[in-house]
Image (tube, rainbow, N blue to C red):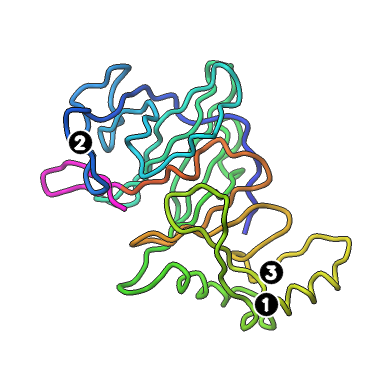
Amino acid sequence: MQKLIAIGVVAFGLAACGPDDSLPLTAESTPAKPACATGSPLPLTGLCSDGDAALFLATDASAETFAPRCVWRTEEISLSSNEAIVFRAQDCSGEGWDQTLYSHVSGYLKARQASVPEDQFGFILQIVPLADGETAEQAALKTLDKAPEDQRTRCETYPVNGLKLAGRVFKLGPNAELEAELNAANPEDPWDACGPNGVTMDAMQVWEGRDHHALFHMLGQDTPTWDPASFTFYKKGADGAWTKAS
């Protein structure tokens, strides 16, 4: 899998605002104002694009903008006719920096700078829908069919602490025996284990468990321009309104 290269600038410069404070906010429903205070609504969901924390299941409040004139903006990406993923990312157009463009292809979110060719992208997130009764950990273990054959029975999931995401954070990595073998075989060099959805010493990669999805985050080596905690699914109802889902 192509590694994510740190992207120094951000998203489409869309202006926006948050939901109506007079209406109750739940994990299932986030009504948007009919008009945004600082610009027009986003074209797909109608949500305001100011990066308001109320639009997302979670945000990392400790995340700082890269420069004084960078601001958080809301990004939306269509996943299907009635599902979208919404997140916040930094817009540094005020600094004169290049935009970052986001797209969805075959279950992956990708990012690239607007000034570079379209094929020069980085993967940032893999979205894996869960079957009824399936856990995110079970979905992660299924990816071991892409791992080296001699590692497939020696990889396991384990929880990760200290990383702010909306859901349950874990990694798919080697068991103690395999990790010891990899360290002994590569005393001075970084190593990978458990396939493309496993661990690599060259970059941060983690899984996140949600109610209906497993998310595989490819965070790279540097602070990303997007907020990994903010990825939030929205569903379109029969009335055409988009509501927040877990």
Q: Which residue in the structure is indicated by mark 3?
A: 193
From the viewer's perspective, tell me whether residue 200 is left or right of residue 9. Answer: right
Q: CA distance from mark 2 to mark 1?
A: 47 Å
Q: Which range is magenta?
A: 234-246
Residue closest to the far front: 161
Q: Which residue in the structure is indicated by mark 2?
A: 31
Q: CA distance from mark 1 to mark 3?
A: 8 Å
Of the two numbered discs 2 and 1 in the rendering, the one whose residue sits closer to the viewer: 2
Numbered tag placed on residue 205 in the rendering: none
Q: CA distance from mark 2 to mark 3?
A: 43 Å
Residue 20, position in %: x, y? 21, 28
* Label 2 packing within 10 angstroms: few (<14), some (14-19), many (20+): many
Residue 135, position in %: x, y? 40, 70
Residue 75, position in %: x, y? 40, 35
Whichever of labels 2 and 1 marks the residue nearer the N terminus, that label is: 2
Of the two numbered discs 1 and 3 in the rendering, the one whose residue sits closer to the viewer: 3
Check contact, mark 2 vs mark 3: CB within 8 A. no
Element at badge 1? loop
Whichever of labels 1 and 3 marks the residue nearer the N terminus, that label is: 1
Q: Amino acid at mark 2?
A: Pro
Q: Residue at x 62, y 59 (%)?
A: 1
Q: Amino acid at mark 1?
A: Pro
Q: Which residue in the structure is indicated by mark 1?
A: 148
